[in-house]
Amino acid sequence: MFNYTFNVSDYADQITVKLVGGPSRPVVSFDSNGGSQVEQVTVNFNGKLTRPADPTWAEHTFLGWYKDPALTQPWDFDNDVVPGNITLYAKWSLNTYSVEVVPAPHGVVTASPSGGAAGTEITLTAVSRGAYKLDSLAVVNAATGAPVALTKVDGSTYTFDMPSANVRVYYSFEPIVQVPDTYDIVVADTAHGSARASLSNASAGSRITVVASPDEGYVVGSVDVVGPGGRVDVERLSSGVYVFTMPAGDVEVSVSFTRSGLPFLDVRPGAWYYDAVSYVWSEGLMQGTSGLYFEPDAGMTRAMFWAVLARIDGQDVTGAGWKEAARSWAVAESVSDGTGPDELITREQMVTMLYRFQGSPAAGGMAVREFSDSASVSAWASDAVNWALASGVLTGMGDGTLAPQGHATRAQAAAMFMRLA
């Protein structure tokens, strides 16, 4: 502070007093480095700084203010003084959480990594001891007990995303019981849901229940059981519950899930092709002829069929040049000779292309004889038709005929693609 003393009477009756201040007070700015904003403050020269309220940042812990951007020199609020305008920098640590695996007998489950920040993918691997197999596996929030979603990779490997909390892993193993004269039941891994069978092995004639649980936004598309003699009949008891009779041999159960709520006005629940259309639409194999119509009874061209097979093979067959892209792929893969792309495909042509796409596997020669119009199957399509009948890809028309020369509809094509999966 500066003091001036003068006598007004020594001057004229009008005076002007001009005060010129000294330098302004220094400003302290705060760089939160990703955290919430902290307002700058002014202090006295060489005065001490009052600690502001700590900033916040989701999934981070505040470690203090630093004098340098490299965060090597902490600011000491008790002793450091402000020599002029400065900026202080916030230091943070990313919150990490731990995975505690609770031990159980007959095997071990390991977590890799053993913890991490929220969103870190954790892999759980189960290893049994002796004749045991994994029976149950659960991950829960250690504080609240809330379950954490698991994704199945295979029968002994699962993954989950680390939540913003420590977690515990609980598991159990059960003995593998192999009764004489029984056969294995293997449930194939599937996307968009899970499935389990009531038994892992059973004798011929046993009734086996399959429970299919779709993820949110999905429904059960199909449940297929294949044994040593081909496809096994499956009966639907209720939503998500199916049964079949165990044959004299090992079986594989395959469950597919499709997106719920088809947008097509002409594909209604209960139609024989509803599940098939749901499957090809949800898998991106077939689209509607417009946004609101699928036209299940419309014909399928040869080019359309090539395009779907190419998509199954992982090819991007879209856009203005889709037809030529599909034709080129079909010729290169020896699926078709590429002729007549705009012609309607027949049922035996469709089956033959599927047969070639599968590598022309061996097939018996008796199945086709069960149909009254078997003589109308072209000689070049005979092996393909027998393969398709034996594998369940092709079924009859419901009246004892195959109609091999008939034009295939979009619904029939969708059904074959679903059975091929």
Image: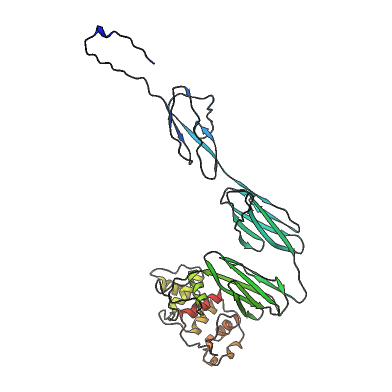
Residue beneath the point at 71% across and 59% down: 172
Q: Position of residue 338 (x, y in %)?
A: 44, 78
Above or below 386: residue 113: above
Whether residue 69 can be seen here:
no
Q: In the image, what residue occupies the spot 74% across and 56% down?
A: 104
For the image, the number of numbered tags is: 0
Q: Position of residue 330 (x, y in %)?
A: 47, 75
Seen in the picture, residue 190 relative to 395 is either above or below; the reply is above
Q: Quadrant of the N terminus?
A: top left
Tell which of 403 and 15 is nearer to you: 15
Residue 341 in which image quadrant: bottom left
Q: Where is residue 47 drawn, in percent x and y?
A: 47, 23
Here the colouring is rainbow
Q: Toward the viewer: 236 or 152?
A: 236
Q: In the figure, is residue 361 to the left or right of 202? A: left
Q: Foreground residue, 12 or 124?
A: 12
Q: Position of residue 176 (x, y in %)?
A: 75, 67
> Can the viewer see residue 321?
yes
Furthest-left residue in this view: 13
Residue 184, above or below 150: below
Residue located farthest toward the top when viewing the structure as drawn: 10
Q: Nearer the viewer, residue 209 or 87?
A: 209
